[in-house]
Amino acid sequence: MSWPHQVGVIPRRADCFQHRHAVDQVGAALADGNTAVLVGQVLAGAGGVGKTQLAADYARRAWHSGTADLLIWITASTRTAIMSGYAQAAAEVLPVSPENPEDAARAFLAWLEPRAATATSRRWLIVLDDVSSPADLSGLWPPAGPHGATVVTTRRRDAALSGPGRRQVPVGMFTHGEAASYLRAALAERGRHEPEQQLAYLAADLGHLPLALSQAAAYLIDAELDCATYRRSLADHARRLADLLPDTDALPDDQTTSTAAAWSLSIDRADQLRPAGLARPLLEVAAMLDPNGIPAPVLTSPPVLAYLAAHRTHSTPGNDPAAPITADQAYDTLRVLHRLSLIDHTPGTPQQAVHVHQLIQRAVREPLPTDRYDRLARTVADALTATWPDVERDTGLARALRANTAALTRHAPEALYQPEAHPLLYRTGASLGEAGQVTVAAAYFCHLADTAHTRLGPDHPNTLAARYNLAYWRRRAGNTDGAADFEQLLEDTLRVLGPDHPNTLAARSNLAHWQGQAGDAAAAAASLVELLEDRLRVLGPDHPYTLTARHNLAYWRGRAGDAVGAADFEELLADMLRVLGPDHPDTLTARSSLARWRGEAGDADGAAADFEHLLPDRLRVSGADHPDTLTTRHDLAYWRGRAGDPAGAAASFEQLLPDRLRVLGPDHPDTLTTRHDLAYWRGRAGDPAGAAAGFEQLLPDRLRVLGPNHPDTLTTRHSLGRWRGEAGEVDGVAASLADLLPDRVRVLGADHPDTLTTRHDLAHWRGRAGDPAGAAAGFEQLLPDRLRVLGPNHPDTLTTRHDLAHWRGRAGDPAGAAAALAELLADRLRVLGSDHPHTLTTRRSLAHWRGEAGDPAGAATAFE
């Protein structure tokens, strides 16, 4: 025999072979005298990531460079194959007969042992390709030493494959660049050229898996397809993966296994490991979910455990096959799948604990019979629903659940609507809205309503429920036509479900809200009085929806000017505490509303104190980043300002803004509102120029995000005009408000409170610009409309009376001003109480105008 010598055949080099970083890692490991174990990570795939090609490349380079005197390549899929490979090497390099493989293998390993008397000084490299079980190498590991090196390729990641003298080298997918480069080269060899963007898209569609890329390139060439056409076929769920890749007799690079079948042996092996029979059904569950990350609780939820028990493939002796499956067994199965490189399981990241390659998922899904597939889809939907928390304090978990729902919906678009729309579909849309993505939520429910209409019919309760959610989130996104949505929905719901159905009552509730939003708070309150009676009759006094009706009634009573009457919240809160408990979100919302209306009733200090007490409970229940917690911080800052600390309010809004930007994003309506209020309180704290600058920066964003007709956009235009005036640009304010007024009339109507506010401020700034008579005339025209729309006791009506008196005095009628203020004071005392800031303002103004009217004694008495 001559040296150097080779035993076994190195697989031929793949066409368009890509040099990869893992080869360099192998060299570094072997340079230290270690055994290099090439394993596939799940994110990098299992079978098909190119471990054999990388080992062959290293072996071929070692052979050609002369760094190995003896090169042995063994296809090591069984212990017998390993033993036979060693025996063959012993027969060729030692005077040992291969007739007894076990003895020959021992003799060969002894010859490699550096401490043995018969040890060789030859440089050797042994490649054990595709080891299927660590047990197959028990007692057969080549020794570590200065003259030799070992490379092992395997799909396993057991601890037994690492340890002293052994270094695992994870083999991943192609990088984005490697994948595109491979496709470009493979196609170019056949004279084919495709757009770079299409090559990149196709590489992503195939998850950058080397085996799939090579077979897809061969299929493209054989079928004479372009990338774009092939990608459309791949995306067609009616086409099986096996039908979109070459037949086994046409595989490239001497391959023997198709991509679709590359993992079948690993799945079979995983199913045999403890806990036996659970690997395949659990992988089926994972195959329906997001390949980029599945939350751990989903895969150990009761619906999944029931599915595992029902579809267990087999059981080991001594185990009861009918016994229920535990969460611990499901966890152990995840570890089995991880060890076999079928998934990547990282328990330390529970929100995205499991990653599965998208082609493994497809290979697992496609063979399932239709009825089994549909049951699986509903089971997975049940699991996601069971995992979804009532309060989404963990925004990362909510995002992961939404991503997994989207994946499930793509894989099973029909099953989730049979026999009816699964509740998961509605929970996902609500989650989007609760996370602040109100426009996205509206678009989601628009699609859901259209789909339910198509699949279930226009009058199906699920279709009506989708329309209800669509109308709700369109309203939250700022749509001003929401009343029409709810009017039509109410008509259809009454016809289909009847007057007492909960969905009918919910539609009435939202229609009442829209009446209020349109400016008719009194009508909203009246509608809610009727609704409350029906909810009490149908649902009873302690039902959460009844409590919600009471809450909304109190709110709109307050908006109608009955701030003291809105203290009904105090009685409501007691009932919510009794029925729902102190930590229920609705209870916390009632506390928030109670605090607000205490402030509106004149107790700004009490409102600020209430929000200060509420904030720790919001933090504890919902978490620091929940939108409701951020809203409580916003309200606390606002009422601190109203309580006389504008600088503190501005500072609090400044601290809140980065958190709203981080959690909700720059375009969320709440983020924009925080910017609005920050600018406002900067102005109130003595920086009118800073306030004007803040509103000037805000207006383009509100125009871009909400559009020119959104009420918040109009409010920002109003505020910008006001603070420009406060900053000294008095002459332009009245003109800007005059430009705004027609838009408010057109969008909101002539009687909307915000329209009336614009008329009020227009009159005020006319006076500030030097036209007191014009201001008085403007307030005189406004007052009858505020009396008609808001009533005589509404705070805004009283404010208009105050300002009318003031500008009459400035226009030359101090006696008339004093008389009007005396009448107003009696009403403010009656409505707001003696300590309300507006009452105190009226008393000061009355004293001033008595003095101006020639009654200094009366003025002095009033000031005292």
Image (tube, helix red, strand yellow):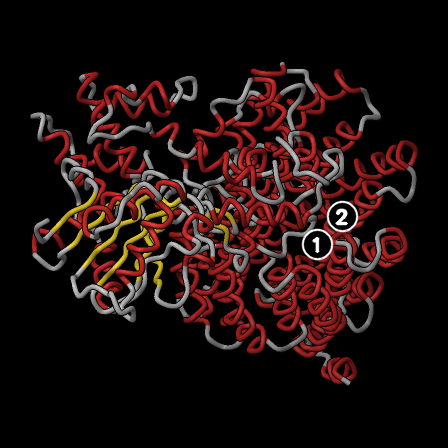
Question: Where the C terminus falls, by quadrant?
Answer: bottom right
- Neighbor class of circle 1 (other Cα within 10 Å; few <14, some 14-19, many 20+) is many
215 vs 178, nearest the viewer: 215
413 vs 750, nearest the viewer: 413
Q: CA distance from mark 1 to mark 2?
A: 7 Å
Residue 259, image x, y percentages: 34, 30
263 vs 686, nearest the viewer: 263
Query: Do we see residue 258 in this rendering?
Result: yes
| Residue on which the image places disc 2 | 791
Numbered disc 2: secondary structure = loop
75 vs 858, nearest the viewer: 75
Say the numbered circle drawn on residue 511.
none
Marks 1 & 2, CB-CB < 8 Å contact: yes
Numbered disc 1: secondary structure = helix
Left or right: residue 69 compared with residue 80: left
Look at 30% across and 58% down and name the residue there. 36
Say the numbered circle drawn on residue 797.
1
